[in-house]
Amino acid sequence: MIIKILGSGCKNCVTLAENTKVALEEAGVAAEVIKVTDIQDIMAYGVMSTPALVIDEKVVSFGKVLKPKEIVKILETAK
Amino acid sequence: MVFEWLNNQLLRMEWLSNLVKLLIENVFGLSIQDRWGGGLHFFIYDVIKIFILLAVLIFFISYVQSFFPPERTKKILGRFNGISGNILGALLGTVTPFCSCSSIPLFIGFTSAGLPIGVTFSFLISSPLVDLASVLLLASIFNWRIAIAYVIVGLILAVIGGTVISKAKLEKYVEPFVFGNKMLEIEPEQLTTCERLDFAKDQVRDIVRRVWVYILIGVGIGAAIHNFIPENMISLLLGQDKWYSVLLATLVGVPMYADIFGTLPIAEALVAKGVGLGTALSFMMAVTALSLPSLIMLKKVVKIKLLIIFAGIVTIGILIIGYTFNVLGYLLV
């Protein structure tokens, strides 16, 4: 599973990345977490509000800083 | 009558002012007439007042804002042409919440969806300038007439700025990669009331965390102006009769970055010291509408010429508003 955090580097994106790592541990899922900060790369996913969460190339959330337990729920459905 | 009382207790918090006065006089043993007592009173009262108002206002406004995610704003704006697009863009800019680092994806998103860049700019100008929470704070510190006047001129500035940019056909100064991106067509999920309340709560926490430093600094400066800086010095720099006061206030404010909540106590103290209302408002607008961080970000999506025109229009607009309010302000106070 490859998880990407889209965001140009402001605090929200950092928090989302941290929450994602916590969620991965809680759910016991192994995944690579990549931070995508280049604006053109972000636009390739068509999102308008950052931070955004992408799992295996599918945008699962945008515009919110998800809490770890919300991410865990998303991970369960993604499995 | 009831409105006056509500206004005085809820927004101006006279009860708080009286409580703090008791604290200063009885616990610290200082008179609020002298500079240390008065300064301390100003500081404690203003800090508490702003934080209470901040938390309550942000909570309610965020709840309202949860109904206007940027994606919905984009859809709504897509249906309007010409100046009504600019007007709606300016209006929606005040109620659409977005983190300032989203401003680039938002710009690209709006533009790729086919919105004229003038509409996007109306949105981008009004958004930091006319903040619902700060309007209410303005009402609490000054009065409702001033707050409403501020909203109206802020919106007019946003509409005119955006329209000028559209009419001057400045699209060619936008970076090419901004256009024609395929945007996600997902409708953001409908939030439940519980989720909206959560969002509002999170917004309060995040915003307080972000701005508490600015508020303390702002109130500190306000207290200094209120009680320590001699009136003639302020008058010399920013006095109502000085033609350069609005210009100075604006030029000082433009490169600064601070949250609007931090500038309010400074504006309050300045006006109490006889500075023109327009001068104080210019300072506030200059600090919030233009900031170095947001301009640097905008530079990634528009070429320098458009950036300069944008900054220029906003600055000139602020100057005009400042001078007008100085001249006509007596009608509102």
Image (cartoon, grey):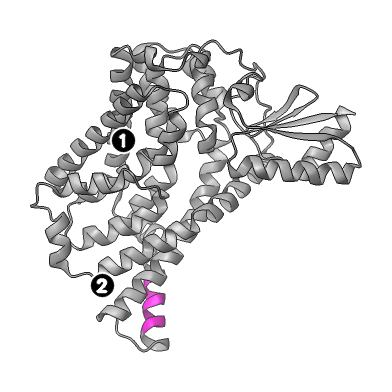
Disc 2 versus disc 1: distance between alpha carbons? 31 Å
Q: Is residue B17 magenta?
A: yes
Image quadrant of residue A69? top right
Mark number displayed over residue B154: 1
Residue B109 place in picture, x, y as percent: 54, 20
Mark 2 or 1: in front is: 2
Q: Amino acid at mark 2?
A: Asn
Query: Image quadrant for the N terminus of chain B?
Result: bottom left
Q: Is residue B218 visible?
A: yes
Mark 2 falls on what kind of element? helix
Q: Is residue B197 magenta?
A: no
User: Could you tell me which residue is drawn at 26 percent across and 68 percent down?
Assistant: B226
Image quadrant of residue A29? top right
Q: Is residue A32 above or below residue B221?
A: above
User: Could you tell me which residue is drawn at 33 percent across and 86 percent down?
Assistant: B30
User: Could you tell me which residue is drawn at 35 percent across and 74 percent down?
Assistant: B41
Q: Which secondary structure class fits the magenta region best?
A: helix
Position of B145 compared to A18: left or right? left
Q: Is residue B140 above or below residue A79?
A: below
Residue B278 place in picture, x, y as percent: 20, 46
Q: Amino acid at mark 1?
A: Gly
Chain ID at mark 2: B
